[in-house]
Amino acid sequence: MNQILFPKPPPAEHLPLIEWLDLTDRAEVGREAFFRGRNAEYEIFRKTVKSLSYGHIGGGSTIFQGAPGAGKTALMLECMEAIRQHSSPDDPWVAYNIKPENLESAAEVVMLLVDAANEESERLSKISSGSGAKKLERIMGIGRKMYHDLSERGVGIAGISIGAKPNSEQEAKVYSQRVFQDAASFLKSFRIVVFVDEAQNTPVEKSTLGVVDCLHNPPGEIPLVTAFFGLSDTEAILSKCSLSRPPDERVANLELLTYEESSEVIRSVFEAYKFSGSKEDIEIWVSHLAKLSQGWPQHISRVSVVASRVISNNGGQIKRELLERVLDEGQKRKESYYAMILRRCSGQPWIYKKLALVAREKNDILGLDEIFCIAEHARTKRGKPVEDFLTEALHAGVLIETREPPNFYRIPIPSLGDYLRSLPGDPPAGI
C-alpha cells in the first residue's frame, strides 16, 4: 500500500499481551496492531490522495461504508497514520478527523482545520532546519494570528458569526465558500485530508450543504480531499447533503475479508506474541480460526483474543488438543455479538428471523418491497413508520445494501443469517 505516497505504515506498537487480552471489543483498541487486508479500499484512498499530491483539487471525496464491525474505523486510522508519516517540513500534510455534527458550521470546520495545521507546523518545526525552518516559521505566524482572531472574537472569518444559520441552500453555499476562501491564504500551505467518522450521522441541514460542498470542491484552491467513513447508508445520507455525484470508483462497501487475509491477521497475532508450536499445528489453528471468523473483522478480533487467552494460559504453546475448546468459545463470542446486534433493534425477533428465511429463499438478496412487507405488521402495530425499519436494520448491522444490483439488501455475514433463522418464535397468524 505505499508508493505515493505511500508505503503502508508499519504496524502500530503492539499492546502488551495481558492488556490486549483484557480488551473486549475492537472499539477499545484504537489503531490496531494487527491491521491487515483492505488493500482494494486502501488503493481507492491512495489514488485520491495521490491526485492531490499532483495538484488536482476538487471532487476528491471518498466514501467507505459498511455494517458495524466491518473495520471502517480501523481502515480510517491506518489512512490517517499514512498521511502523518508522509508529512515533512518541505511537504506538510494534515490529517484531521472532524465529527459529523461539526459539519453544520463552516466557520467551526475552518477553525478546526486551522488549529490542526498549526499543530502540524509546531511538530514539523522541531525536526526542520535551514530554509524549511524559516518557511515554517512564517506559516506558523499566519496560522497563530488566524486562530487567535477566531477564538478571541468568537466570530468567523470575515466577520461571519460561527453560529450563523443560512436561510437557503444558495446562501449556505455562498457563506461556506466565503469562510473557506478567507482561510485559503494559510491552508494552501498544506495538503489537507479531512476524515469524517460515523458519517451516517451527518446532519441534513441547509448549513451542512454548504460545508460538504466546500469539502468536496474546496474554494480558493485549498489542496483538500475528504474521506467519509460510516454505516451502510452513508452514501444515501451524503447525497442529501449536496454530495450527490461522488465518482463510483470512490465509493467502497466494506464487506468480508478473504480467507487468506483472515489467516494473515491470525498468523500475525501468533507471531507477534511469539507463541510456539509445530508448523503443522499452527497452520491447523490458523485455518480453523479463519473459517470460524468468516472474514468478518469483528469476528477475527474476537476469535484471536479467545485463542491467545487459551495459548497464554498454557505456556504460550499452540497445541492441537486445545483447539476444540477455542472453537467452542469462539462460537459463543460470535453468538454474543449477534445477540448484541439484535438488542440494537426495536422489532420483535420473529421479524429478523423471517427476513433471514426469505433471504435464503431469494439467493440472499432482498428487495425493498419484501423487507417492508415483513416489517409492516409489527411496525404499524407499534405506531412506528415502516420506512424507519430499514434504517434501523442497516445501522444495527442486520442488513447491508448491495451496489450491484442497486437498491437490494442482504445479510452481511453468513453465520448471522444462520443465527437469525435459529431464533425461537414464529410470526403471528396471518403474517
Image (cartoon, rainbow, N blue to C red):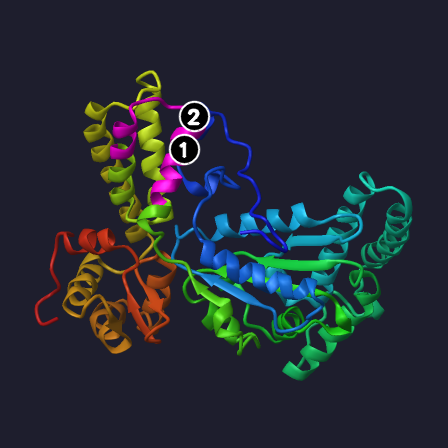
How far across and down, in percent of the image, does residue 352 sit? 22, 60
Q: What residue is shown with label 1?
A: 269
Residues rendered magenta in the picture: 262-284
Q: In the rendering, at what x and y percent does residue 240 appear?
A: 52, 76
Nearest the eye: 352 or 234: 234
Residue drawn at 56 percent across, 74 percent down: 241
Residue extending furthest toward the left: 429
Instruction: Name the image quarter holding the C terminus.
Output: bottom left
Is there CB contact under 8 Å for labels 2 and 1?
A: yes
Q: Is label 2 in a helix, a strand or a loop? A: loop
Q: In this view, does 33 lie above or below 51?
A: above
Whole-angstrom CA distance, mark 2 to mark 1, is 6 Å
> Under tag 1, what secondary structure?
helix
- Determine whether 326 is above or below 226 in the image: above
Which residue has dot 2 on it?
273
Residue type at mark 2: give it: Tyr
Identify the residue shown where x is 72% and y is 57%. Answer: 113
State whether the magenta stretch is mostly helix, strand or loop. helix
Residue at image location 46% in from the left, 39% down from the top: 34
Report the front residue among 317 and 364. Answer: 317
Q: Is residue 419 visible?
A: yes
